[in-house]
Every structure is written in structure tokens, then in C-alpha cells.
Amino acid sequence: MATSTGPRLIAFVEKRGAIFLAALMALIAIVPVCHLALAPDSPFHISIGTVVLIGKYLCYAILAIALDLVWGYCGILSLGHGAFFALGGYAMGMYLMRQIGTRGVYGHPVLPDFMVFLNWKELPIPWWGFQSFPYAVAMAVLVPGAIAFVFGWLAFRSRVTGVYLSIITQAVTYALLLAFFRNDMGFGGNNGLTDFKDILGFSVQSPGTRIALFIISGLTLMASFLAARAMAASSFGKVLVAIRDGETRTRFLGYRVEHYKLVVFTFSAMMAGIAGALYVPQVGIINPSEFAPTNSIEAVIWVAVGGRGTLVGAAIGAIVVNYLKTIFTTGWLAAYWLFALGGLFVLVTLAMPRGILGAWEDAQGRFFKARPKPAATNRPGPAP
Amino acid sequence: MPVPAFLRVLWAALWLALSSGLAVAQAPGARDIETALDKLAADSFGDTEAAIALIARSGVAAGVAILEALGDRRLFFVAGDTAVFYKDAAGRSFNARSGVATDIPASASSVRLNNRLRGQVQAALGSMTLLSPDPAQRLKAAETVVKSRDASALPTIDAALAQEKDDGIRRALEDARAVLTLSSTAAPEPQRIAAAQRLAANSDNESLSLLRQMAGEARGGLKDTLDRGIAAIEGRQKLQLAAQTVWFGISLGSVLLLAAIGLAITFGVMGVINMAHGEMVMLGAYVTFLVQEGFRAKAPHLIDWSLPLAIPLAFLATALVGIAIERGVIRFLYGRPLETLLATFGISLILQQAIRSWFGPTNLSVASPSFMTGAFNVMGLQVTYGRLWIVVFTLVIFALLLVILKATPLGLQMRAVTQNRRMASAMGIRTRFVDMMTFGLGSGIAGMAGVALSQIDNVSPNLGQSYIIDSFMVVVFGGVGNLWGTLFAAFTLGIANKGLEPFAGAVLAKIAILVLLILFIQKRPRGLFALKGRAVDQ
């Protein structure tokens, strides 16, 4: 069995996918060991702060893969994927808020502190059921999925494409940003949800829980990659690429373009919701600034930096850019982070349209095969 | 210092002689005051009430000081004595009977008041100051009388009206008479009806509430007049509210138009998604700040000229930045709108951070020139000069842009390149140059918008970000490539937003507008006024 499924799996995920999965597996295995087994003064010891940081990167990588699926494969540049991420995060945050129980500042058994503070008497309906973990997880997937479905159903059916779609996805996340800033919405206003105590009975602060969350994030990233890869490699995925390269032509060939787009958009939004749900217990806070249009655009640049339409590249881009961000925003470089990020946007679009992975493969091709692969940019198809 | 002390005694003696002489001359009024003071010294509420009425009837100027002192509890008496003293607002003390400056004995205590008496004091003061030589005092007195609704002030009002020259005060007095007549149930019905008709011509809330109050108990003809008056006032108020909403909407719409109009060129005409557009607005605002600082340092007396001068400078500066961006980045990305979007977003981050490192992250203050401060009233509608200037400025820029596009060689070439790039190129138009100039024009207009927005928004590195989404929505709503559509869209969105605000609040109104726009774009993906023909297919 192993001898037959192994090569088949590698063929399915391609060589780069296999390397990526192996590297992830190693990361999941080594990081907890380095934290738990090595003495704190060992040069290879990894502090719990770093574990959380890497866990955060992994969540971003899931978001990047979700975005790459719609942008890299289907040509839908969503500038609102941060909204799906944040919605998933809010669902998890609401569960964590309900878990606080009487340990809040006001000690109310049901209402979170901010509701007591606002003098509310009973739990608003959107909060019902969030004391249950399975319900919260389901909501973290279904709410972004439902919003993406409704939005996509309207937008794709009326053939809103290209930059128009990008602009209105941005408007969606902006509208949600404004909405979640309101105290009346009942999601904590601009303070958001924080001061979490425990998840499934384990303290969110304890190193054990954090390592568990880290491992789960890694496994979820692997699963997301495999799911996205399965979608991209299927005949469904081929139609997506066809839509990206020539939407009108694909429609004339008899495909219901809007259905394909809707499926991949909704699926991607759900994946982003999962990423957000994993992100919140690790960072310990969710607030409306996660809806900021800038966040969504930043996620797009992760994908562009890594190489769009490759999935692996998107994940690598998310990790690399966020690692750079961590380096830049701590210490004397902080003032230059936006210069670096802005420069990255310009540089990648002008000089590296296929991102790190594309550049790497081009270089490889030049050395080993003498002929580079044809570029897989999402240039628009010939005019109909 | 014996001499001043001697003078003071002499002055007091003179004053005493003078005032007693006056007392003889104006015997009835002065006698009323004397009686009133006797009553006040008794310090019982009933006597005090009678005393207030006496003083009000006397009309003697000295009574005003006594009543004011009584109202502020600065009037003192000594138990078992007829002497009454008062302090003026500055704290100097006088004998109330003689008006001579004197010390108040330690045994004196202040005359007590209750709320009803305090109201009577106010009413009495109102009617007494109606005849004051100071116009501001008279106007205030008329308002006080209206508040008191004390019909006994009617004769004084008539006396005041007989000699009043100032139109504004006349009107206030006539209103006051109408209020008093209407609210006095003893007045004859025809007079009350006339009063109600007069008040119905006003649109303020006080008149409305008085009419409503009277309508509750009125009968017959008066009742009909009152009901008609209430309806008339309510109708006018509704109209006024609508006018105000429209004006606020136009004001917001002009801001939207200002922010979007440059984008209408770069996005609408060229098809370039310029996410750094907001930063061009921001740069324009910083140019304004620099110009103003320059004036402040070199020519502070000409500071009002800094804003007019900043307009062309901001245009030039941002146009140059725009041209640099077009030459350096955008020209490599024509035909790849999504990449353009990302690259220009990167540029916007760089520009923001550059300004932040240079000027700091805090808000800078750009002062308004004197011709933009203040406000005026149009039929009860408050219009500030600042907003009015911005509306005018926006419309002027819009008109200029139309002229440039329709009546200059550059505009002609721009339109040619937009409609058919290759054909234009074949006709000898330098399309690359036209691209550059078009982008420079769009950016320069954004910079001029920044000059205006520096007057109503915080000048900070984030200034542009807050406009970029709105600007795109305006351009898309209006229809890409259509300036008139942009104008229409900006004012529609502005008025709709302000119209929703009273029901939904500012944030919810904005959300509602965004949602409506998102839905609208589903219905008409190319905007309200879509270009027809071949340009659409590209």
C-alpha cells in the first residue's frame, strides 16, 4: 500500500508540494521538541513566544492558500478576504468569551463584561449557542461561507469582474469594519473580544495549550493545502484556470462560469474562516481592525510575493512576508517597515510577476532544462 | 490721605442732596420704591411679592439695581430696622434707600426668595429694561418677557414699541406682545386670534410649543387659527429640515466629488486603478501646510493669501509626483489592472510612511483664512462660509476639467487615446506622452482637492486612506469614463447619506450606502451612466 500511495501522493501534490508537506511535518515535530525537551539556555531552545509567532504565520499561510485558490487559479482578486478571516476569528472569540463565565471583571455568569458594562440585560440572539465549541467552529466556517455565497451569487451572476469586483470586495470589508466598530452590534465595539481564559477547559495561556494550537494550525495548513490542491488538480480546477485565462471563451464553451466561481469563492472564504478561528486563541484578541481593507490587501501581497497559482508559493509568501514584518516592526527598523512593504508591492509586480517560487523555478529551468516553463500569469485572454 | 476722604464725604453729601431732590421731583415712583423697601425689610414672601410689583410699576431706574440684587440674593436687611442694603455685581455695597456707598452691618442677612418670586423678579426686570437705552439690553428684555408670559408687562411693551426704532427689536417686541396676548386667557378673543396668526408666521420651536399648549384649551375660532398655525409652522420646519439635509448632502457630495474627480480621470479615462490617489490628496494637504508655514514665517500679515497660493503649488507638486509614478511604475503595467492596483497600493504605503517620517504621525493644523470663517443664515438655514467655498471650489474645478477635456488639444488627444489607442497613435498622437500628462492631471487635481480638504479634515498621513474607498465608489457608481456621472453620483451619495443619518446615525448610514452601492453594482456593473459602444468591450 505504502509503496503505491506514496508516489501517487507525490505525483498528486507535485514535487514542490511534497517538499512543502515534508517541511511542515518536520516543523510540527521539531518546534514542540525544541521548546519542551531543550533547556532554556540551549541555543536551539524555542521560546513559547516564538512558538505562538510561528503558529500565527501558519494561520496566515492558510489564508494565503485560500486567497491563492480564488486569485491564482480563478483570477478573482478579492480585496476582502481579511473579512472572512476576521469573521472566523470573531466566531471563535465569541466561544472564548462565553467560556470566561463568572471569571470576568463583573462576574456575570452569562453576559461578557462589555455587555454588562453597556448595561445589557440578556444575551443578544447572535450570541446564542456560542457556549458550545462545535457550534462555534461550525459558525467560523458557515458565516464566512454564507456571506461569500450571497455576495458571490449576486456578483458573479451579474458578471461583475476584474477591478470592479476587487473594489466592491474592498467595500464589503470596509462596511463590516464600520459595522463591527459599533457598540450596538454587540461584538465588543472597537475593543473587540479579549481576556480569554480557556478553550475546551484548557487555559489559553498555558504552554501546553499553545503548543497544541500550534500543532493543530500546522495540521490544518497541511489539510488546507491538500484540499486546495485536490480542487486545483481536478477537472474542476482546470475549468477555473480556463475562466482565469479567458472567461468569455469558457462561457461560450458551455461552462456555467458563475457556478464555478461561486463554489471556489465560497470554499475559499470558509478556509479563511478556519484560519481566523485558529488565529484568535493564539493571539488572544480579535477586534474590528482585522477588517481593515489594508489587511486584506496585505494578504494579497503575500500571495504575489510567494508566487500566485502555486498554493505552495502562497504559503511561503505569507510566512516570508510576515517574518520580515516581525523583524522590521521590532526594533529600530520599525520606521522602515512600510517602505519595505510598499517597495515589495512595487518590486514584485514589476520584476517578479510569478513571485519567489516562480523566480526560483525559472532559475532552475535555466540551469537544468535550458528552457523556462511558460509563464502562468493571469493575463487576460484575448478580447472576444 | 485726608483729601480723598474729604472728597468722598463731599461726594456722598452731594449725591444725597441730589437723590433726595429727585425723590421730591418724582414723588410717586420714589414713594413706591420707599414702600417696596419697607416691605422687603420685612422679609416675608407675601410682602416681597408686593414689593416686586411696586418696583416694577414705579419704573424708576434705581429699582433695576434693587431687583437685580434681590434676584441674585445680594439684597440685605437688618431685622427690626428699615435699613436695606445691596451689593452690586462687583461686590461693592450700597444703602438701597439713598444709593450711598456704605458698609453692610454684620447683623444683616439677605432677603429670602423662592422660585415663584425669582420668576417674578425676572419678569419685572424684563419689563423694566424694555426701555433701556442699550439695544442689546432691550432685546434681552423682550426675550425675558416672552419667557415670563406675564401679561402685566403688556403696557410696558406697548410703551417700548412706541419709541423703538430698531427693526429687529421691534419684531422681538411684537412677538413678545403676541405671546403675552395669546397666553393671557383674559384677553379678548379677536386679539388672541391676531396674536396666534402673528406667531404662526414664525418657525421656531417656542412659538410652536406655545400654540400647541394654547390649542389644548382653546375653543371656536381661536382653536381653528391655532391649529392652522401649528400646521403652518410644522410644514415650514419640515421644509427647513429638508433644506438643511440637502445642503449638508451637497456639502458632503462636494467633498466626495473633490476626492473622486481626480480618480475619474486616472481610473475613469485611463482605466488605471490608482490606489495611491488618496495619498495625492494627502500630499496636497501637506503642501497647503507648508505654504501656510512659509507665510507665517515670512509674511504673517498676508496669511489669508496662503490658501489661494497653495492651490497652484499643490497642483504642480502632486502632478509632478503623479508623473513620476506613471513614468516609474504604471507605464510598465498598462493592460494589467490588478497588478497596477497592487503596485500603486505599495506606492501609497511608501508615500504615507515618507510623510510620517518627515512630518510625524500627528495631525497638523491648517488654519482657515478669515474669508472662510463665520456663517450666515438663509431662511433659518445655517450656512458656513468654509463649506460654501468648498462647494464653489469643487464646481469650479469640475468646470475647468470639463473645459480641459473638451476644449484643449490635450483633452482632445486624451479622449482619442482613451477611445482607440492604436488609431490615435497612427494619427501621430504621442500616446505615451498623453498617458503621462493625463495621469499628471488626475494627480494634480487630487492635490488641489487636498488643499480644500485640509480645511475640513485632519491633516495627517492617513488623510488619503479615508477617502479612497468612497472615491472609487463614486466613480464606479457614476459610470467609469463619465465626468457628469461622477458629479451626479457624488451629490446623490452625499444627499442620500445625509438623508439617512437622522434615522440611522452616521455610521449606519454609511454602511447602508455601501451596501446599497454593492447591490447597485450587481444591477449595473458599469455604473449609472455607462459608456456605450466599443470602449465597453475592452
Image (cartoon, helix red, strand yellow):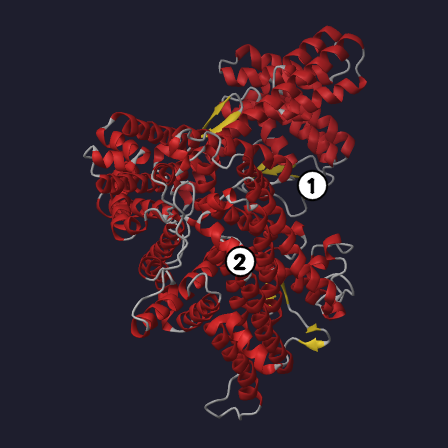
**Vertical side of A156 occupied by B228: above or below:** above
Chain of the residue under the numbered disc 2 shown in the image:
A
Relative side of B138 to B384, left or right:
right
Mark 2 element type:
helix
**Vertical side of B172 occupied by B88: above or below:** below
The answer to the question of whether label 2 and label 1 lie on touching residues, with beta carbons closer than 8 A, is no
Pinpoint residue B437: horizontal percent, then vertical percent: 25, 40
Which residue in the structure is indicated by mark 2? Answer: A237
Mark 2, residues whose alpha carbon is within 10 Å: few (<14), some, or many (≥20)? Answer: many
Along the line of sight, the residue nearer the viewer: A71 or B55: A71
**Vertical side of B71 occupied by A276: above or below:** below
Pinpoint residue B176: horizontal percent, then vertical percent: 63, 18
Chain of the residue under the numbered disc 1 shown in the image:
B
Relative side of B113 to A226, left or right:
right
Circle on res. B78: 1
Identify which residue is drawn at 25% across, 43% down.
B436
Mark 1, residues whose alpha carbon is within 10 Å: few (<14), some, or many (≥20)? Answer: many
The type of residue carrying mark 2 is Gly
Along the line of sight, the residue nearer the viewer: B29 or A197: A197
Pinpoint residue B453: horizontal percent, then vertical percent: 39, 41
Residue A292: in sight, yes or no?
A: no
Along the line of sight, the residue nearer the viewer: A64 or B106: A64
Relative side of A108 to A322, left or right:
right
Pinpoint residue A163: horizontal percent, then vertical percent: 44, 46
